[in-house]
């Protein structure tokens, strides 16, 4: 919590009024204001460019849930004072993505979460992220992330959440994350150049509880590499050429609770193999691929499992997409 070391209070203009709880304070200071205040503070002053590079939240360290945010949506600009025992979640805007050099001036433990999703970033700008060695959450979804850029981030050993969906990476580049053994959440969806070769690397990420492999050109044999992931509770293999042979391997991941096999080649017969999963609660599939009697039989085979639609198509009448003439 922020503490003032002297009895003199800062003027109200320094406080981001209206968003602060009474138990905490986040001060946004210009460079001149910081010097004029001349106060000893229990916290850290972070320096951002004078043009906003994004939005930031301030959070209690080790807990990134919304209820533990002390402030939300402040501009990342100028001098930002962060109370002791806290860090920031930072969402970059276009300006921030085009010159990430300012990250190098921040303490390595100042940023707990960085969101660069859907921004155009060069390999050099992505490489600067490696400075944030204590970061636990990184979103690079829908960026121009290459194998070379991902290789520069291999030292981020504290990451728990990593979103690499819809980028330019290949199986060769993914090898960079094998040392991130604290990862519990990993999204690789819509990376069609990954393929079955990623299996051995994924098998080393033994802390994973969530894995999204939608649209990654997987084959059945690759799924055998997921069996050692004894903590995995949610697996998405939607839009892959996975058949009943692949379900033989999936049925050996005993920790699974949620499985998405929408738009794959699995059949009713193959889905009955999932009865071997003691914790399975939900299976997503394209419901209209199965006859009503087949779905009824499946529900009998998987008594404790809820069958859910994995496609928005099932929300519309069946004739919606038929030709008009």
Image: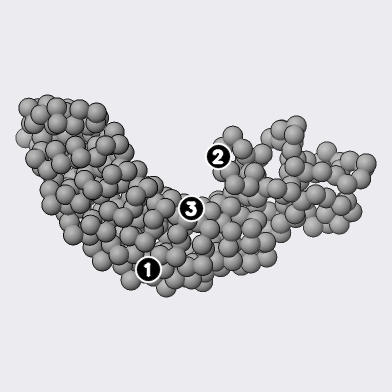
Q: Secondary structure at mark 1?
A: helix
Q: Secondary structure at mark 3?
A: loop
Q: Residues within 10 Å of mark 3 (few under 14, many from 20)?
A: some
229, 324: nearer the viewer: 229
Q: Is residue 315 visible?
A: no
| Quadrant housing the C terminus | top left
Residue at the disc numbered 2: 65
Residue at the disc numbered 1: 175
Q: Tell me if 193 is positioned left or right of 4 in this view.
A: left
Q: Secondary structure at mark 2?
A: loop
Q: Earlier in the sequence, mark 2 or mark 3?
A: 2
The percent position of residue 72, horizontal first and vertical second, equals 62, 40
Q: Which mark is residue 12?
A: none
Q: CA distance from mark 2 to mark 1?
A: 30 Å
Please name the residue shown 83% across and 38% down the image. 12
Q: Earlier in the sequence, mark 2 or mark 1?
A: 2
| Quadrant housing the N terminus | top right
Please name the residue shown 68% across and 47% down the image. 86
Residue at the disc numbered 3: 160
Q: Tell me if 144 is positioned left or right of 74 in this view.
A: left
């Amino acid at each position: 919590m922020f503490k003032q070391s002297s009895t003199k209070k800062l003027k109200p203009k320094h406080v981001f009024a209206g968003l602060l709880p009474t138990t905490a304070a986040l001060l946004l200071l210009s460079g001149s204001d910081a010097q004029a205040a001349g106060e000893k503070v229990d916290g850290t002053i972070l320096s951002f460019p004078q043009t906003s590079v994004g939005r930031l939240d301030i959070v209690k360290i080790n807990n990134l849930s919304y209820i533990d945010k002390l402030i939300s949506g402040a501009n990342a600009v100028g001098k930002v004072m962060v109370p002791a025992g806290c860090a920031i979640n930072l969402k970059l805007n276009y300006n921030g993505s085009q010159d990430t050099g300012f990250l190098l001036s921040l303490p390595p433990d100042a940023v707990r979460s960085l969101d660069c999703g859907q921004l155009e970033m060069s390999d050099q700008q992505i490489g600067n992220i490696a400075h944030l060695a204590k970061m636990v959450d990184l979103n690079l979804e829908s960026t121009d992330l290459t194998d070379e850029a991902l290789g520069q981030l291999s030292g981020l050993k504290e990451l728990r959440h990593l979103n690499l969906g819809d980028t330019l990476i290949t199986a060769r580049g993914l090898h960079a994350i094998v040392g991130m053994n604290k990862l519990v959440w990993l999204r690789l969806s819509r990376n069609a150049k990954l393929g079955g070769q990623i299996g051995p690397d994924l098998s080393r990420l033994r802390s994973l509880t969530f894995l999204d492999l939608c649209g990654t050109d997987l084959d059945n044999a690759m799924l055998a590499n997921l069996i050692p992931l004894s903590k995995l509770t949610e697996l998405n293999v939607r839009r892959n050429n996975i058949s009943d042979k692949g379900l033989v391997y999936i049925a050996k991941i005993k920790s699974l609770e949620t499985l998405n096999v929408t738009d794959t080649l699995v059949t009713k017969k193959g889905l009955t193999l999932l009865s071997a999963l003691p914790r399975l609660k939900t299976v997503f599939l394209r419901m209209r691929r199965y006859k009503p009697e087949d779905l009824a039989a499946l529900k009998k085979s998987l008594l404790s499992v809820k069958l859910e639609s994995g496609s928005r198509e099932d929300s519309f009448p069946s004739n919606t997409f038929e030709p008009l003439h």
